[in-house]
Image: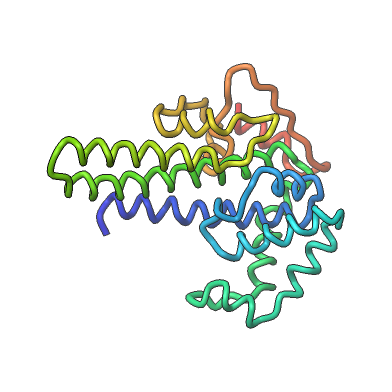
Amino acid sequence: MNEEEKVLDEIHQFDIDNEKTAVGYMLQDEQAAIMASRLLQEKHFVTPYAAFVLKIVKSCIAKGDNVSDVHFKVLSITAEDWKNLDKSLSITCQEYINDCLRRSHAFVGNNIFAEGIFKKIQDQYLRRECLFLLDESKYKLVKTTDSKNSKEVMFEISQKANDTINGLIEDEAYNYSELGINILNQKTESGISTGFKRLDEIIDGFRVGELITLGAGTGIGKSAFAINLA
């Protein structure tokens, strides 16, 4: 495995882990489930398990069901239907859901953290689409024989990029078209590192002008965490 393949493999695993955390949020926090159903689409996920759970969440939220109903419906998936989602893996529905709940349990109720996870899934979807479009375009450009064909390829690239951006859900709090254009054309400005790699991956570090409130029960470790950040 070369260096590029190694990095892509790490990114893929990062996406899988983020999706498990997102699923855990959807199954434990009603506000997170509503937010996810508004911001995310099934195609944004790399794992069919997470995409299928989102489908159930969207259906339940549309009918006014609560997270308990969502949880029950997810766990009611038959073993055969679950296996058909991804025949390459042997993990059961209960095992997958338990892992998702474990990953998100400590942060349930923190809508800012949940929002960060959902935004990262959006970002990573756009990144994957850009990489796919790049690979496809490189192959087609190598096969062109004249400037006319090259222009046709460039037009097709532009059209597909616009289709990807326009296919995102618009939300009054976010301009995803602008987000997509920034990812396609600009280098993301680095934030101030928190000192915790996984936290930086989720919130992209601290930003100038941000006010972040940290909340948890007594004895959980808020003070120790804040000292480590400092």
Q: Nearer the viewer, residue 152 or 25?
A: 152
Residue 99 percent across, percent down from the top left:
65, 64
Who's the residue at 73% across and 43% down the image?
35
Who's the residue at 71% across and 49% down the image?
37
Who's the residue at 45% across and 33% down the image?
183
In terms of image quadrants, where is residue 144?
A: top left
Residue 82 percent across, percent down from the top left:
63, 75
Q: From what the image shows, is residue 119 above or below residue 48?
A: above
Residue closest to the far top: 209
Q: Is residue 217 left or right of residue 176?
A: right
Residue closest to the far bottom: 80
Q: Quadrant of the N terminus?
A: bottom left
Who's the residue at 86% across and 54% down the image?
64
Q: Nearer the viewer, residue 96 or 81?
A: 81
Q: Is residue 156 left or right of residue 106?
A: left
Residue 140 percent across, percent down from the top left:
24, 48
Q: Is residue 134 left or right of residue 88?
A: left
Q: Quadrant of the C terminus?
A: top right
